[in-house]
Image (tube, rainbow, N blue to C red):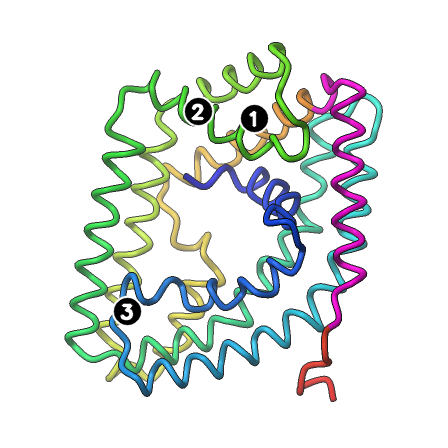
Amino acid sequence: MPLLRLMSLLICLLLLASCNSTRLAYNNLGWLINWKVSDFIPLNSAQKTWLSEEVKAHQAWHCSTEIPRYRPMLANLQSTLATNELDADQLMNQIPQLEPAVDRLLLEVAPTMAELFKQLDETQLSALKANLTDQHQEMYKKFAAPDLATQAKERSERLEKRLDRWLGRLTEAQRARVALWSAEMEDQNRIWLDNRQHWQRQLLVTLEQRGTAEDFNDKIIQLLVERERYWTDDFIQRSEINTLAGAQMLADLVNMATDAQRTRMAEQFAKLDRDLQQMQCEPSSSQT
């Protein structure tokens, strides 16, 4: 399950090198754009060829335009995390710096997704609907059906796993703090899944208009980029509360960090910075 907005931004940025190379971000952009299409939509050969070329262009843009932005972002994040007595506000202040990177990426790929959706025939759209329904049922069974105590335990385990590369094994005090945060999330799994399904329903309604609506591409881009406009009321109400709770928990974990954990975190930042420096990207065509 995706974590809270703040935690997603911070941890996803930290996990940029989670597969031993920062090049993960560049190489896996193709996966993001394809949106695991093969799992949801059976594309024909012409669509696959077209999408492949679009992916190459997006990868070139990402590598030449976005990757260079990551080093100062990471340096600023590292400096913040090294602060004595880190507090939630300092982490919250990272959001305006990190969110634009996500928005730029979505804005870049959204027109491609809109064009791909416009090409779908009725069979492909039916397959998409069925696959989204199946996935929702599977995710509900995994994340929302268990009792709240089980959900909290599994949420804690997922976060501990994400933090392991940066802090190593958490201390008992840190694990207790994660468990407290997770318990406070209560029914967040269901709220998140309901919100996700709500967005998907709006997407499918828009896809039904792909052959008739003159503003179809604009509607798809809005769904992908201006995503908060399509959140449920429950999710909106819980979002700010949960974001602050996540920031407070992360600040506490860093303040509890042992010397060994701080050393490990500094080493991971240094490795990530080296990886970014070593990446060689050709300028995108739009910049030449």
How busy is the neighbourhood of tag 2: few (under 14 within 10 Å), some, or many (20 plus)? some
Instruction: Kindly report the secondary structure that dominates the magenta region of the rendered protein.
Output: helix
Amino acid of disc 3: Thr
211 w.r.t. 147: above or below: below
Q: Residue at x 20, y 52 (%)?
A: 133
Which residue is rendered at x = 64% and y = 42% of the image?
A: 10
Location of mark 2 (residue): 185
Check disc 3: other Cα within 10 Å, few if <14, some if 14-19, many if 20+.
some
Q: Which residue is mark 1?
A: 245
- The disc placed on residue 206 is 3
Residue 242: say if magenta.
Answer: no
In the image, residue 270 above or below residue 63: above
**Residue at left 77%, top 43%?**
269
Residue 269 covered by magenta stretch: yes
Tell me which segment is drawn in magenta: 254-280
User: Residue 22, position in %: x, y?
Assistant: 67, 55
The percent position of residue 54, horizontal first and vertical second, equals 49, 81
In front here: 252 or 39? 39
Residue 281 percent coordinates (x, y): 72, 74
Outermost residue, front direction? 20
Left or right of 24: which side holds 37? Answer: left
